[in-house]
Amino acid sequence: MSTEPAGIRETHAGLVVLAGDRAYKVKKAVRTPYCDFGSAALRRRALARELELNRRFAPDVYLGLGSFRSPDGATAEPVLVMRRMPADRSLTAALSCAGPDERDELVRSVARAVADAHRRAPRGDPGRAGPAALAARWSANLTELGELTADRAVQDRLTPMRTLARDYLAGRTELFGLRETRVVDGHGDLLADDVYCLDDGPRLLDCLDFDDDLRQVDVLDDVATLAMDLDHHGMPGAARALVDGYRRFTGDDAPESLLHHFVAYRAVVRAKVAALRGRQGAAGAAAEVAALSALGLRGLQAGAVRLALVGGPPGSGKTTLAGALAAATGARLLSSDLIRDDLDRGRPGDGARPGSGTGGNGTGGGAVGGGTVRRGTGGYGTGRYTPERVAAVYTSLLDAAGPLLGRGESVVLDASWTTAERRLAARALAARHHAVCVELRCAVDPRTADARIAARGPSPSDADAAVAARMRAAAAPWPEAVRIDTAGGPGAASGAALSAALSAWSAGVGC
């Protein structure tokens, strides 16, 4: 028999009575846009379904159905009978009092338990977790959230969230096609207070039971729910470790943008639930709505797919800055110099630089494109730099970027970008993939640029000071770009220049 005191836990749709070594759950007699528990028969049916579904995750916790009866025995309220979990073993409580090594082990065990649950889960219907279904869910949740709260700050977030969610889904058809095999009939509502870390392993409780469609999820969506909740509880390190652990156990190579998108979606869902609880008089609900809606907007901003043009004449520091920006943001880095090298060797030009950017799971680098070319293989407008060959390089650069954007990866393009025509083509590519186009023009005085060219060692670029001068003179105005001062030298890419580039990367996205 448990020595813990009796208690009651309340959600927007149910009550759990804790007594001895049992927990007794009843549904509230509520009707919402997504569930109807208005009669005892409907509540019994819902509890029977909850019992069936949750036994997939924790069969030793969900014991059966019973009834609470009135003194005269005439009224019976259906109740789900469960084994009571020790309060201090919830994931939230366990992490809050554990040391670093123990926290790592707790999160690892939960990540493995979620991965095992997904491996056993029935396959889901990809159509219920695809872009159209997600777009409909986003629209419904944002509309309902707006109807449930009068908070001005929350209301102000709704339009940018709607726009960012729509753009992400509209531009990621290829990504969601690749994710179809990872859709399962999952948990649907993994929260830290419903995960218990027992001596013989974690228990995952309280799956989403009232709507079979909403349980058809991409596995990363399920994981993102718990990651979002840990972040909301002030445990971002645990959230990151959970996702990283899950990726290791499953080999999931989804781009970070998809994780951010799912975290944002789950934050908005929980904000709506908090708003419903606020309507029922729950203390602190308004603050929950504000915090969760802010988390949702941040997630969508972080997950917005970007195409960054980092340009400037030779010696301007564009290659150094492009590499630093890609490393700081996890974007893929594509180089015009390496594409030119590949094309010269008769290979398809992917333009990826050694160690640049990341793979979908944040751990891999891009394919190595080409080798170092000796300088002097063609002056400005001749040899390797005829208009036709330069046009082929830029075409290949954009051709390589397009599929990456469609798969949810941001891309940094390292090239001179001296013509307005080529910048227009890049903007059109970003627009086709509903990506944010970030334009950065590296600037430095010509003497410093010439000194850098003279001092650099072997490089894929064979431009000398004379070529640089002609390119500076021929460059079309670029008023749309953010000017990045790189006069501080190569080290500036990790200082002021990178800070300015990162500000431009984030500016205006969902604001």
Image: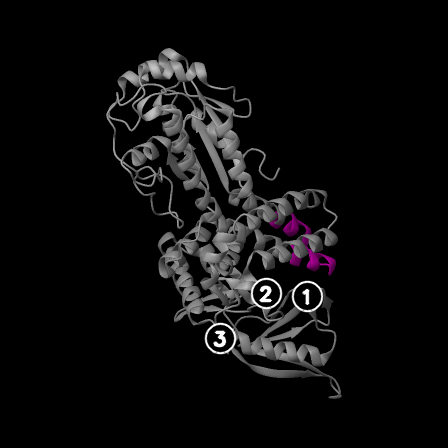
Q: Is residue 110 left or right of residue 87?
A: left
Residue sitting nearer the eye, 424 or 65: 424
Q: Is residue 29 left or right of residue 2?
A: right
Q: Amino acid at mark 3?
A: Arg
In this view, 457 is above or below 401? above
Q: Is residue 66 left or right of residue 366?
A: right
Q: Give the magenta part as a residue range.
A: 272-292
Of pointers 1 and 2, the one earlier in the residue sequence: 1
Determine which residue is flagged by label 2. 214
Disc 1 to disc 3, how far (Cα)?
Answer: 23 Å
In this view, 253 is above or below 337? below
Circle 1/circle 2 CB separation < 8 Å: yes
Determine which residue is flagged by label 3. 56
Give the image location of residue 351, x and y in percent: 35, 37
- In magenta segment, residue 286: yes
Q: Amino acid at mark 1?
A: Tyr
Determine which residue is flagged by label 1. 34
Of pointers 1 and 3, the one earlier in the residue sequence: 1
Number of other residues with Cα within 10 Å of mark 2, as a class: few under 14, some 14 to 19, many 20 or more: some
Q: Quadrant of residue 68?
A: bottom right
Label 1: state its secondary structure: loop
In this view, 410 is above or below 112? above
